[in-house]
Amino acid sequence: KAGVTQTPRYLIKTRGQQVTLSCSPISGHRSVSWYQQTPGQGLQFLFEYFSETQRNKGNFPGRFSGRQFSNSRSEMNVSTLELGDSALYLCASRTGESSYEQYFGPGTRLTVT
Amino acid sequence: TQLLEQSPQFLSIQEGENLTVYCNSSSVFSSLQWYRQEPGEGPVLLVTVVTGGEVKKLKRLTFQFGDARKDSSLHITAAQPGDTGLYLCAGHPGYSGGYQKVTFGIGTKLQVIP
């Protein structure tokens, strides 16, 4: 079974631009979560989608948004990029709402200059 | 908000040594996971513990869930350079009809020197 895939793997943007990141979960997994990882803050939860509905949201500004499609693929969008948005963005999938274990993709390394 | 504290945050040891890293919280978790992350990659799930006092072994790695399900430890015997990485613990509060998000610790960065 193929793992979680994320595209692109690396991205360089300038301040003020917007970016869209993509995540394809493991086949059969209906839940997708997004995390931001930085050296100082660790893994910070952004949001989770289950069956195309956002189930929970972390403490991030409204510039961060996401969606999930009927095939469970998910996208995350960040508008008006700031230098502090530079991070590794990780996507994780799990089978359903009651499952504990998450399977992570390799991440997208975003650098904002 | 449930918090998970990991200690130590950094650990550098010689190959062959033993080590233990800790994951502590004041909150109760219904399950706890340990992950290992290598640079530039996503975390990889190592183990899930769900029962208070539970001990699980994965080759040279021993994981224990505290009796009260508020803390956990990871013990590595005879560390190898391949054990180098960031070790993350993640606590799940349980599913009670409404979704509650998983909490991650900040991680323990382990370096095993050959």
Image (cartoon, coloured by chain):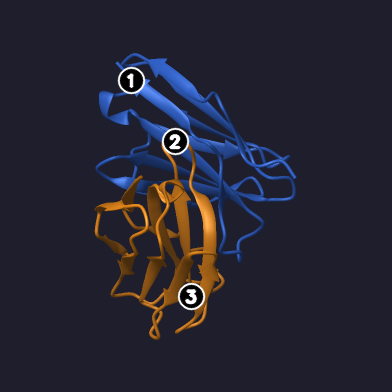
Which residue is found at the position 65% from the left and 59% from the top?
A96
Mark 3: few/some/many CA within 10 Å (<14, 14-19, 20+):
some
Visual hue assigned to chain B: orange
Mark 3 lies on residue: B30
Instruction: Give x and y (percent) for residue A74.
Output: 60, 37
Visual hue assigned to chain A: blue
Question: Between residues A37 and A16, which one lies in front from this camera angle?
Answer: A37
Q: Amino acid at mark 3?
A: Ser
- Helix, strand or loop at label 3? It is loop
Q: Amino acid at mark 2?
A: Tyr
Mark 1 lies on residue: A112
The disc placed on residue B113 is none
Q: Are marks 3 and 2 on the same chain?
A: no
Where A17 sits versus B28, above or below?
above
Which residue is found at the position 36% from the left and 77% from the top?
B70
- Helix, strand or loop at label 1? It is strand
Question: Between residues B9 and A26, which one lies in front from this camera angle?
Answer: B9
Mark 2 lies on residue: A89
Residue A75 seen in this snapshot: yes
